Amino acid sequence: MENLKLIQQCLDYVEENLTTDITIEELSAKVGFSVFHFCHIFKFATGMGVMEYITKRRILWAVYEITGGMKISDAALKYGFNTSAGFYKAFRKNFNCSPSFYAKRYKKHKPYRIDLYKEEHIMLTEKNLRNILKVWNIKNCEIKNIIYESTGEINDHSFLVDNRYYLKVFTNLGTVKRNIDIQLALLNKELPAVLPILTKDNEEYFTDGELYFILTEKVKGKPLLGTEVFADNYEKKAYYIGEIVGKLHTALKNQNDITISTKDIFKEVTDEWLQKAERVMNIPCDITEAYLSYTEKYKDKLPIEVIHRDLNPSNMLMDNFNLTGFIDFDLSQKSIRIFDPCYLATGILCDSISQLSEAELDKWPTIFKNIIKGYDSVAHLTDEEKLMTPFVLLNIELICVGFFSTQEKFTSALDTNVKMTEFILKKWNEIL
């Protein structure tokens, strides 16, 4: 079982047992780690020490009870603080204000449950945001929602401020620190980086209750649209974006402590998603057999490194098709490195499959191959990686089709990914 999954199990256990005694020894025994190793991976996952995390969760739940009418002394005792004075001291240390001030400022709401796999949906009013921005001495500003151009969805944890800054909010300190560390790694390799603006107290991020905020400059450029790659000079464009993904991986190569999550994407498919995908679409037997044969033979020979993991075109900022920055490293993990260029190729296809004509889509196999060539020119693929790139493409689509087939709310996404998978299978001989 993955380290990340084990730590998530511990967080869930802590959440259900905050009014009882919880020790580091108890938690480490639950997941079968030594205390030292457990503390190490816990801090990389959450950005906090074990007892620091538990104390903070207890404080948040205590203040929730207080805003609901419970006496401060009763809430303090319920969540393991021997005295009101001890609770007050711990609260001031964590939130730089008194419990009564915090309770007056915020309406009663349950603390956000930490999910290491994703950031939860966060509801913030304009008044909340304006108060937060004062930390950077920004007042009387215009605040706008950010809308994903390719989907029309609203980003509920990022905001555009005065058309000059981005304010991003997180519920997990580990994710905050990971994003900062990765951007610094890019800067060290002379890649464009989106670094946080320091607060008036010279901090890289601001903590407000259980939320963490980063402010960055709005860099020049816009998120890449997959359809842009199909326009003039598409072969050159594809090669270029392959090159810059290779440079991204070069920058991340020695950042082994950025994340603890390592995922076996092939086991996911063979154990679960292949069977579910085959229920909703026809996959030729010869391709399935080749997929199973190649993955069995080569999967353990593919280099594993820290990767972006969510390298959609929209997470690459471009100005006149020149890279101005990579964004959204929230899902970064250790995995096979060829996942990123293959995932980018599927993202380009996803953006385009319902927008372009069949004749235009015929360019995609060449786009895919040129992305791989550009990547190889920088990151130097092994022979095994070159053989496996088509199967990694298929792997990604099998995960998507299998997963979306189990979720009623993702009917549209399922239809799109079935269409994409059928297109890839149709072009299979061209991408081999």
Image: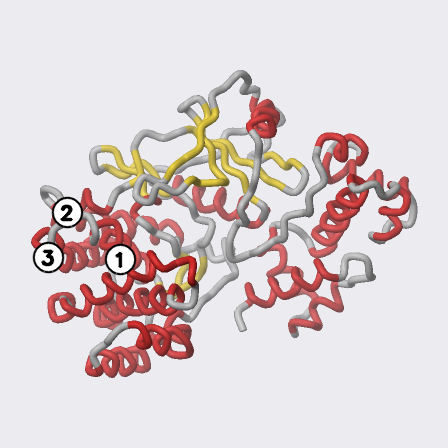
Residue 190 visible to the viewer: no
Q: Amino acid at mark 2?
A: Phe
Measure the alpha-carbon separation of dots 1 and 2: 13 Å
Measure the alpha-carbon separation of dots 3 and 1: 14 Å
Q: Is residue 297 above or below residue 182?
A: below
Q: Secondary structure at mark 3?
A: loop
Residue 125 visible to the viewer: yes
Q: Residue drawn at (22%, 72%), measured in percent from left and top?
A: 387
Q: Which residue is mark 1?
A: 346
User: Measured from the top left, where is residue 63 in percent x and y?
Assistant: 77, 42
Q: Which image quarter is the N terminus in?
A: bottom right
Q: Residue drawn at (42%, 58%), measured in percent from left and top?
A: 409
Determine contact: label 2, label 3, CB under 8 Å.
no
Q: Secondary structure at mark 2?
A: loop
User: Measured from the top left, where is residue 263 in percent x and y?
Assistant: 44, 67
**Left or right of 278 in this view: 82:** right
Q: Residue drawn at (65%, 42%), measured in percent from left and top?
A: 210
Q: Which mark is residue 230?
A: 2
User: Measured from the top left, where is residue 238 in percent x and y?
Assistant: 18, 50
Q: Residues within 10 Å of mark 3 (few under 14, many from 20)?
A: some
Q: Amino acid at mark 3?
A: Asp
